[in-house]
């Protein structure tokens, strides 16, 4: 299967520009192209319109709504009545001054960086072993993805049960091996709670990253490795001097995707700790949820949402710039 | 692409019978492959232990759940936890909601995503680039950012507490993802077949339906199953767009279970197992499409 896939990748890539040439000169006379019908209305381009309109009506609306509401005061009722006054950046200033927001920003950072580093390193190591090949690897790969397809609420519940202070299995093991005297209350100690939700997030994220990195490894040219083997390069040498540099663009993509996914993580944390204890695990999405749906401070919720939108936007732009350079 | 279950070239090379004398290098390579297999199988056993523990706990009576030392393998299978979960009408109602919403999202998502991915794959030029980019960006937004505005919008048009509202909301997440993953499937199709269809008098829509969709059906199965899985797993919309407990999807009901039954771990684990069953079934039945499709589509 690996060979099929790698052979298919360049083929598909070459296809695109190759078919562009004949298509532009063929079938449709050049005249229609010049008359002012915008490209998007010409078939089959026009097929993207239903999806584009749907997303404009939902996501586009959501973006506009968040930006608009975040700049207004007077609460949701005034906003819906069209009477909310424009207050500029007041909501942001207020939010930035809020201890709770700064805490959420910090927790998000710790959680995302912790998840990201471990997810990436573990996934890369596993992908390398897969790429080297072993008996039953397609089975192992499928089983690995079970952790990813499980609803996050379920994986959160599993970890909550495993880490339970009174009857959790992990405590049983720690005590019986003699590592600790007493049971540890993983989810009620602030530091341990953050470590615990990060661990769960690593468990959930590793499979998908592994699959992406493996797809990247499969596209690396085998000939280079054979040449290096002839020159007497060992495994670690070719890993360091060939695999890692060659994988840089793919790694960057995967890291950015993973950064965005961990940054938007909500479900697992919501069910494991609900953001507690003492907001030690309250990441930004939980903060935004709390502000809008618990406190009903929709303006601050919207300001938090704008901050949450900016993050993927910045990362996305960084990614595109680096992708263009490669 | 579809043959995920067949062995990969690397181990096939190692396992192939080599009639002449086995060299030392070859023997070393085989041993390394065996070690890799042992390491990875042990890793996967450890990785999946939480899932095993869920099923194991759900099959124990409460008296066996909290014992020291813990019962690793339940000897007498106790089905009481499953019985009480499956006789809980709120739970079953939620499973039904999730099934309706996940299926509806899958249908609406495919209906919008398939033509869009095809159009995007065939469109050359700057506009296509900008559109692709917008789809990618839309996929990156945190769900909660969309949930609040949709709540306000739906409240004003009466779509909160409705299946349709949840279907629309989940489609906003599924659609960009589906377009991104599907596009390379269409881009990789041989253009000659579509040209032939055009010469036979098919208009672009007929070409899409009669030629492109049948050829890209592997990708479409991938996306259909992934959108079902993604939607079934959603919690944010289930929490925010539904206030009527009778209309909650299963994920939101499970969070209620956690607070209600935290001392009855066997019940909670049985609930979690039942809630995951449709997903695991879908995944295991269609895994060759899902894994292959993800690997083909995700990095392009």
Image (cartoon, coloured by chain):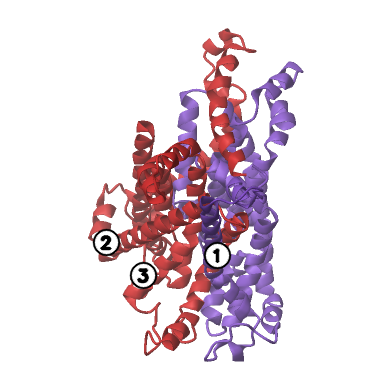
Chain colours: A red, B purple
Say which residue appears at 58% left-offset and 44% top-offset.
Answer: A2
Quarter of image, res A299: bottom left
- The N terminus of chain B lies in which quarter of the figure? top right
Depicted B237 relative to depicted A1: above or below? below
Please give the residue where the numbered disc 2 appears in the rendered image: A102
In the picture, measured across the screen, residue B122 lies left or right of residue A217, that is right
Expressed as whole percent of the image width and height from the top left, the position of residue B296 reads 57, 41
Pointer 3 chain: A
Marks 1, 3: nearer the viewer: 1
Question: B294 and A166: which one is in front?
Answer: B294
Task: Give the alpha-carbon distance from disc 2 to disc 3, as whole Å.
Answer: 16 Å
Say which residue appears at 37% left-offset and 33% top-offset.
Answer: A326
Please give the residue where the numbered disc 3 appears in the rendered image: A194
Q: Secondary structure at mark 3?
A: helix
Marks 2, 3: nearer the viewer: 3
- Could you classify mark 3 by the number of other residues whose Cα lies within 10 Å: few (under 14), some (14-19), or many (20 or more)? many
Say which residue appears at 62% left-offset and 33% top-offset.
Answer: B186
Depicted B99 relative to depicted A39: above or below? below
Task: Give the alpha-carbon distance from disc 1 to disc 3, as whole Å.
Answer: 33 Å
- Could you classify mark 1 by the number of other residues whose Cα lies within 10 Å: few (under 14), some (14-19), or many (20 or more)? few
Expressed as whole percent of the image width and height from the top left, the position of residue A163 reads 46, 78
Residue A83 in view, yes or no: no
């Amino acid at each position: 299967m690996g060979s099929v896939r790698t052979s298919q990748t360049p083929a598909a890539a070459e296809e695109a520009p190759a078919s562009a040439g004949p298509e532009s000169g063929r079938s449709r006379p050049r005249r229609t192209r010049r008359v002012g019908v915008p490209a998007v209305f010409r078939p089959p381009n026009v097929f993207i319109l239903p999806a584009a309109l749907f997303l404009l009506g939902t996501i586009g609306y959501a973006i506009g709504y968040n930006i608009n509401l975040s700049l207004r005061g007077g609460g949701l009722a005034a906003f819906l009545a069209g009477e909310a006054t424009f207050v500029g950046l007041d909501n942001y200033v207020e939010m930035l001054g809020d201890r709770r927001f700064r805490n959420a920003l910090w927790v998000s950072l710790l959680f995302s960086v912790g998840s990201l580093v471990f997810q990436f390193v573990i996934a890369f190591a596993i992908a390398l072993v897969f790429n080297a090949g072993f008996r039953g690897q397609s089975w192992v790969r499928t089983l690995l993805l079970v952790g990813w397809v499980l609803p996050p609420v379920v994986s959160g519940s599993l970890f909550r049960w495993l880490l339970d202070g009174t009857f959790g299995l992990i405590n049983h093991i720690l005590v019986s091996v003699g590592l600790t005297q007493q049971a540890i209350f993983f989810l009620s100690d602030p530091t341990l709670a953050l470590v615990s939700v990060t661990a769960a997030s690593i468990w959930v994220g590793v499979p998908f990253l592994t699959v992406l990195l493996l797809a990247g490894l499969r596209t690396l040219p085998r000939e280079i490795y054979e040449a290096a083997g002839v020159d007497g390069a060992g495994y670690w040498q070719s890993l360091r001097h060939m695999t890692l540099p060659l994988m840089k663009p793919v790694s960057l993509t995967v890291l950015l995707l993973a950064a965005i996914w961990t940054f938007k993580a909500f479900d697992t944390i919501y069910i494991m700790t609900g953001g507690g204890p003492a907001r030690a695990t309250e990441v930004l999405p939980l903060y935004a949820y709390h502000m809008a749906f618990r406190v009903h401070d929709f303006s601050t919720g919207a300001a938090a949402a704008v901050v949450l939108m900016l993050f993927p936007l910045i990362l996305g732009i960084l990614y595109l710039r680096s992708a263009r350079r490669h | 692409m579809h043959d995920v279950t067949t062995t990969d070239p690397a181990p096939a090379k190692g396992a192939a019978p080599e009639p002449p004398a086995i060299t030392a290098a070859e023997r070393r390579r085989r041993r390394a492959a065996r070690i890799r297999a042992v390491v990875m199988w042990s890793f996967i056993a450890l990785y999946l232990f939480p899932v095993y523990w869920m099923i194991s706990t759900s099959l124990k009576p409460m008296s066996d759940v909290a014992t020291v030392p813990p019962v690793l393998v339940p000897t007498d299978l106790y089905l009481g936890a499953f019985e009480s979960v499956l006789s809980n009408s709120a739970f079953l109602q939620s499973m039904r909601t999730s099934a309706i919403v996940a299926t509806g999202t899958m249908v609406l998502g495919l209906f919008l995503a398939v033509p869009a991915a095809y159009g995007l794959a065939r469109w050359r030029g700057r506009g296509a680039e900008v559109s692709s980019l917008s789809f990618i960006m839309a996929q990156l937004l945190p769900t909660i950012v969309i949930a609040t505005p949709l709540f306000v919008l739906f409240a004003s048009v009466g779509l909160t507490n409705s299946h349709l509202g949840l279907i629309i909301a989940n489609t906003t997440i599924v659609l960009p993802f589906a377009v991104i993953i599907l596009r390379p499937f269409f881009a990789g199709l041989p253009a000659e077949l579509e040209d032939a269809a055009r010469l036979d008098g098919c208009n672009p829509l007929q070409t899409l339906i009669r030629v492109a969709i049948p050829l890209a059906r592997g990708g479409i199965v991938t996306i259909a199953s992934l959108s079902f899985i993604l939607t079934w797993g959603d919690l944010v919309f289930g929490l925010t767009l539904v206030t009527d407990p009778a209309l909650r999807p299963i994920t939101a009901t499970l969070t209620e279970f956690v607070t209600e039954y935290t001392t009855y771990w066997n019940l909670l684990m049985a609930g979690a197992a039942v809630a995951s069953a449709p997903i695991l079934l879908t995944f295991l039945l269609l895994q060759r499409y899902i894994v292959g499709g993800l690997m083909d589509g995700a990095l392009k």
